[in-house]
């Protein structure tokens, strides 16, 4: 497999690992939004969040706060963002599920989501389409 994250998991290429157990590894992002920005990845390869089983997703989310807490304590951060970019349009570059743990401080210069407003009647139409998409 030619997956960059699988190579990191298998110690074929170096990374600054900050956490590892039997099923997951977390390492520092080489292009961080803030120092301490880490990626939490399952050792078992899965391309995206939508292709990952429920049990593995539960284990991912259980580990994330522990890692975020350690980053915050070690580097004196007061908050963090958890972000999963799922698919190219969302900014996913590596086809291996990864959760960004981005430590934050007031005034760190990172921008939040730019919000838009729904046009008249649009929110109801969007809600109806989403509800209709649920199967079973």
Image (cartoon, rainbow, N blue to C red):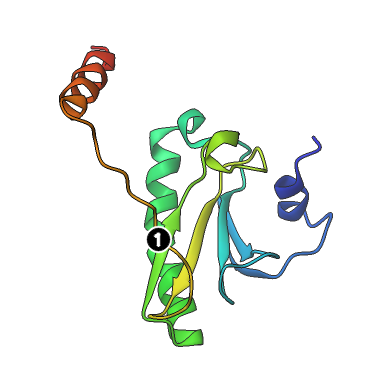
Q: Residues within 10 Å of mark 1 (few under 14, many from 20)?
A: few
Q: Quadrant of the N terminus?
A: top right
Residue visible at 57% across and 51% down in the picture: 41
Out of 38 and 90, give the one closest to the viewer: 90
**Residue furthest to the front:** 120
Residue visible at 47% across and 72% down in the picture: 103
Q: Is residue 13 left or right of residue 120?
A: right
> Does the image show residue 50?
yes
Residue visible at 59% across and 77% down in the picture: 35
Q: Is residue 2 above or below residue 69?
A: above
Residue 120: x and y in percent read: 17, 29
Q: Is residue 96 above or below residue 26?
A: above
Q: Is residue 85 left or right of residue 73?
A: right
Q: Is residue 65 above or below residue 55?
A: below
Residue visible at 41% across and 62% down in the picture: 81
Q: Secondary structure at mark 1?
A: loop
Out of 65 and 86, give the one closest to the viewer: 86
Q: Quadrant of residue 66?
A: bottom left
> Does the image show residue 22?
no
Q: Quadrant of residue 123?
A: top left
Which residue is identified by label 1? 112
Out of 69 and 82, give the one closest to the viewer: 82
Q: Quadrant of the C terminus?
A: top left
Residue 94: x and y in percent read: 67, 43
Q: Is residue 67 left or right of residue 120?
A: right
Q: Quadrant of residue 46?
A: top right
Q: Is residue 10 left or right of residue 19?
A: right
């Amino acid at each position: 497999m030619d997956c960059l994250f699988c190579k990191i998991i298998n110690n074929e290429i170096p990374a600054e690992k900050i956490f590892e157990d039997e099923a997951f590894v977390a390492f520092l992002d080489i292009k961080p939004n803030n120092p301490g920005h880490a990626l939490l990845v399952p050792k078992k390869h899965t391309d995206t969040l939508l292709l990952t089983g429920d049990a593995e997703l539960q284990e991912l989310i259980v580990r994330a706060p522990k890692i975020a807490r350690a980053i915050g304590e070690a580097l004196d951060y007061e908050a963090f963002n958890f972000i999963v970019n799922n698919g190219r349009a969302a900014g996913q570059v590596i086809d291996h599920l990864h959760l960004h743990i981005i430590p934050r401080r007031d005034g760190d210069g990172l921008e939040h989501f730019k919000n838009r407003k729904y046009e008249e009647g649009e929110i109801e139409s969007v809600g109806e389409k989403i509800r209709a998409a649920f199967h079973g």
